Amino acid sequence: MGRAPCCDKASVKKGPWSPEEDSKLKEYIHRNGTGGNWIASLTKLRCGKSCRLRWLNYLRPNIKHGDFSDDEDRIICNLFATIGSRWSIIAAQLPGRTDNDIKNYWNTKLKKKLMHGLQPYNHHSSKQQQLLFVTASPEAAAPPEAARPLSLQHLSSPHDYSHHYSGSYGSNNSTMSVLSAAAGSRGFLLNGEHHTTITSCLDSGGGGLGLYFGLTAESFVFGGFQQLLEEDHHKALLLAVGAANQLDQQYSAAASSCYDEAKPPLVSLTDGGNGAGGTSTSSSFFYDSYSNNES
DNA sequence: AAGTTACACAACCGCGGACCT
DNA sequence: CAGGTCCGCGGTTGTGTAACT
């Protein structure tokens, strides 16, 4: 019944591929193509799955290695915001790039690049946090000519924010839940209008970094989230807020803030050249969440 | 110079759906 | 139709190396 076993996992080689193995694999593909059964003639060399992966991610012709362009960054960001971590689909939009490549690039570089605008906190110790979703001003969603320069805006209290969520949490999963709850159940304000439709809320795993986004018929929100576990501080930012059909416009504004017990929360909107790794590839601006210091 | 840490990338693992017998 | 494997995918781990102390 069924097919023969994939391979003898105890006897096939694992680990990095040698040039000899690569040339054997290339020769096999050259002779037999990739349409057939990966397992059939390769079981003595490597596990079929391993052969397929090596071919697709490294040996295949026209594979691009090296730095990603700004255009590729933009495509990845926009697609991630739209469909999440569907790397194979994203890779299909980037000729020469593999899903594994894009996944690694996102996890090691791009995510951090996008988070670059976050400033270090001063020290608070709090068990209860508030995440705040801030109204997107019409100025911020306008082209650069209109968006800059925006002056610093002091917010007198957390209640100046349109929506907030209170709760305690300590893991990525619960962080995601909080973000989901905050975004989904409370909604957010965009250009003065209340929106409640959040299509997804993602947590991208380790490192305390997460991402969330939302879509409505008229608007788009794509955000990031940073968690500083040891300080129990959380900071959220929106990377892109604007009309969905404006996403390709080349404008951005970045905001950074720091919280000081003696001062009200500060939100600084600036030209995007210095924010989020200097991204100018999508409409973007940042807001911070508010860390409630009451305990 | 040696040890440690952080980072980037390649490879592996486990799962779900498609497919085969 | 049932039982089994294959394929493709996303998440995770392992490894080499550069940067730092």
Image: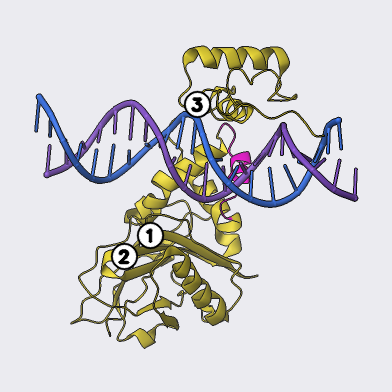
Chain colours: A yellow, B blue, C purple
Image position, residue A178 (x, y; %): 47, 74
The 10 Å Cα crowd at callout 3, few under 14, some 14 to 19, many 20 or more, is: few
Q: Are marks 2 and 1 in contact (CB under 8 Å)?
A: yes
Circle 1 sits in a helix, a strand or a loop, which is it? Answer: loop
| Image side of residue A4 versus residue A223, left or right | right
Q: Considering only order in the chain, which callout, 3 or 2, is on the residue closer to the N terminus?
A: 3
Q: Are marks 2 and 3 in contact (CB under 8 Å)?
A: no
Label 1–label 3 contact, CB within 8 A: no
- Nearer the observer, C14 or A11: A11
Q: Residue at x 59, y 25 (%)?
A: A51
Q: Chain of mark 2?
A: A
Q: Earlier in the sequence, mark 1 or mark 3?
A: 3
Kindly identify the residue that appears in the image at 44 percent across and 47 percent down. A107
Q: Which residues are magenta?
A: A84-96
Looking at the rendered structure, the secondary structure element under dot 3 is loop
Asked where in the image residue A284 lies, by quadrant, the reply is bottom left
Residue A262, given in percent of the width and then of the height, sits at 18, 82
Indicate which disc, 2 or 1, sits on the residue closer to the N terminus: 1
The three-letter amino acid code for the residue at tag 1 is Gly
In the image, what residue type sits under mark 2? Leu
Q: CA distance from mark 1 to mark 3?
A: 31 Å
Q: Is residue A285 left or right of residue A152?
A: right
Point out residue A131 in the picture as x, y percentages from the top left corner.
40, 76
Same chain assignment for discs 2 and 3: yes
Question: Relative to residue A3, is residue A269 depicted above or below?
Answer: below
Residue ID for mark 1? A208
Q: Position of residue A1 (x, y in %)?
A: 82, 34
Task: Determine the CA span between mark 2 and mark 1.
Answer: 7 Å
CA distance separating discs 2 and 3: 36 Å
Crowding near the residue tagged with mark 1, few <14, some 14–19, many ≥20 C-alpha atoms within 10 Å = some
The residue labelled by disc 2 is: A229
Q: Which mark is residue A14?
A: 3
